[in-house]
Image (spheres, rainbow, N blue to C red):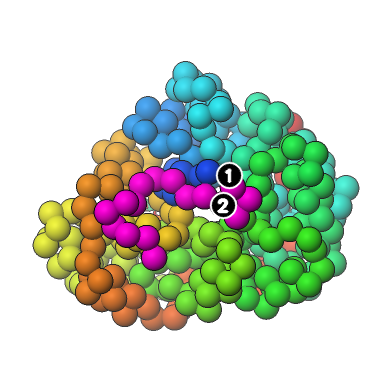
């Protein structure tokens, strides 16, 4: 756990690469609004953008970066290979597709979007392609997403490079302690998707859910610190060493979500938030995912 006093917006990955801890997420960001919101995010101070081939908005992410006028070298760009592109040659080609759409020659962090437990050989082949892309300098770091401890163990047995990042669903109602432990043992950064619990209120992801943003404990801590519930959750992640990728298309909320470096939560606050875990995931179970789960092919540029 980092000392609250020295906490800044930088994490050092296990290969020495520096990554801004707070990234701007563009999941479910419609292509027509993505370029504008990426531009706004960069002008607001974000220097890390998280996208995915499967989001269908990589081209607009690249457009937003160019429109911002900020040097590409100053932006940490993260994207994900979709499962339909798993396999060694397919994943090498997936890099080409993503890099072309983003308008870059090198990607800072390229990760596998999901394990494919029923097709784990293809998942491993995809990861070996990431290792090759790392070796030839096409990417600066590689990782995974939605890998549970048993997927990580199987990956480690059969591949060489320890993932720099494992991006998983993580918010106060679903804290995945076993995944966090497995990541920590490897020196892999845990990166939280839906860090402020968007998955607990997004339409279409299940019935009778309760929004973490309306949680009473978080509301109380927020009032005590004069911060918003989202800021409290983001700070909780950061103080526990995680990276976060909150998504917002609203300029004010975007600015608030990165303005989390001028206060600190005490241990009691952190424990109180940890204690909210319900152990119920909002997103799909990674063991149930196979290529037919989403009928999605990644188009050529
Ligand atoms: P909006 O884009 O209108 O701001 P997550 O990243 O955890 O999945 O959450 C994303 C969701 O949370 C989006 O619906 C986003 O809506 C909303 N959101 C983002 N930032 C905040 C905030 N600071 N306060 C309240 N809601 C927020």
Residue 91 belongs to magenta span: no
Q: Quadrant of the C terminus?
A: top right
- Residue 290, horizontal then vertical, whole percent: 73, 67
Image check: 25 left or right of 135?
left
- Horizontal and vertical percent position of residue 37: 42, 33
Indicate whether 109 appears above or below 37.
below
Asked if the residues shown at circle 1 and circle 2 are in contact, with their CB atoms under 8 angstroms apart, the answer is yes
Give the structural element (helix, strand or loop) at label 2: loop
**109 with respect to 129 (left or right):** left
Range of residues picked out in magenta: 1-16
* Residue positioned 84% across, 59% down in the render: 125
| Residue 236 image point, x, y percent | 32, 62
Please report the residue visible at 61 percent of the width from the left and 36 percent of the height from the top. 58
Mark 1 Cβ and ligand 1 under 8 Å apart: no
- Circle 1 residues within 10 Å: few <14, some 14–19, many ≥20: few
Q: Is residue 270 above or below residue 64?
A: below
Q: How many marks?
A: 2
Res 231 visible: no
Q: Which mark is residue 17?
A: 1
Instruction: Work out whether residue 277 or residue 60 is closer to the camera in this orientation and state it.
Output: 277
Whether 8 is among the magenta residues is: yes
Q: Residue at x 82, y 47 (%)?
A: 132
The reply to whether the residue tagged 2 has its Cβ within 8 angstroms of ligand 1 is no
User: At x 70% / y 29%, what residue is drawn?
Assistant: 105
Q: Nearer the viewer, residue 187 or 20?
A: 187
Nearer-the-camera pick, 243 or 54: 243
Secondary element at tag 1: loop
The residue wearing badge 2 is: 13
């Amino acid at each position: 756990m980092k000392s609250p006093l020295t906490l800044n917006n930088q994490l050092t990955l296990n290969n020495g690469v520096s990554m801004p801890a707070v990234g701007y997420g563009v999941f479910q960001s419609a292509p027509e609004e993505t370029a504008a919101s990426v531009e706004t995010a960069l002008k607001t101070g974000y220097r890390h953008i998280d996208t995915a081939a499967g989001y269908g908005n990589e081209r607009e992410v690249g457009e937003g970066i160019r429109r911002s006028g900020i040097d590409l070298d100053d932006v940490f760009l993260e994207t994900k290979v979709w499962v339909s592109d798993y396999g060694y040659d397919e994943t090498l080609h997936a890099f080409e597709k993503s890099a072309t759409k983003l308008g870059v020659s090198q990607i800072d962090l390229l990760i596998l979007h999901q394990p494919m437990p029923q097709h784990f050989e293809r998942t491993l082949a995809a990861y070996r392609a990431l290792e090759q892309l790392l070796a030839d300098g096409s990417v600066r770091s590689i990782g995974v997403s939605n890998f549970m401890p048993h997927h990580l163990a199987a990956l480690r047995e059969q591949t060489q490079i320890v993932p720099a990042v494992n991006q998983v669903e993580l918010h106060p109602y679903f804290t995945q302690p076993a995944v966090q432990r497995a990541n920590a043992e490897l020196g892999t950064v845990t990166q939280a998707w839906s860090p402020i619990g968007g998955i607990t209120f997004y339409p279409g992801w299940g019935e009778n859910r309760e929004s973490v943003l309306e949680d009473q404990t978080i509301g109380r801590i927020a009032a005590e610190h004069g911060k918003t519930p989202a800021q409290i959750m983001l700070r909780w992640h950061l103080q526990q060493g995680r990276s976060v990728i909150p998504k917002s298309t609203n300029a004010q909320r975007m600015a608030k979500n990165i303005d989390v470096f001028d206060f600190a939560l005490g241990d009691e606050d952190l424990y109180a938030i940890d204690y909210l875990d319900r152990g119920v995931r909002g997103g799909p179970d990674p063991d149930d995912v196979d290529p037919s789960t989403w009928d999605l092919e990644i188009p050529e540029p």
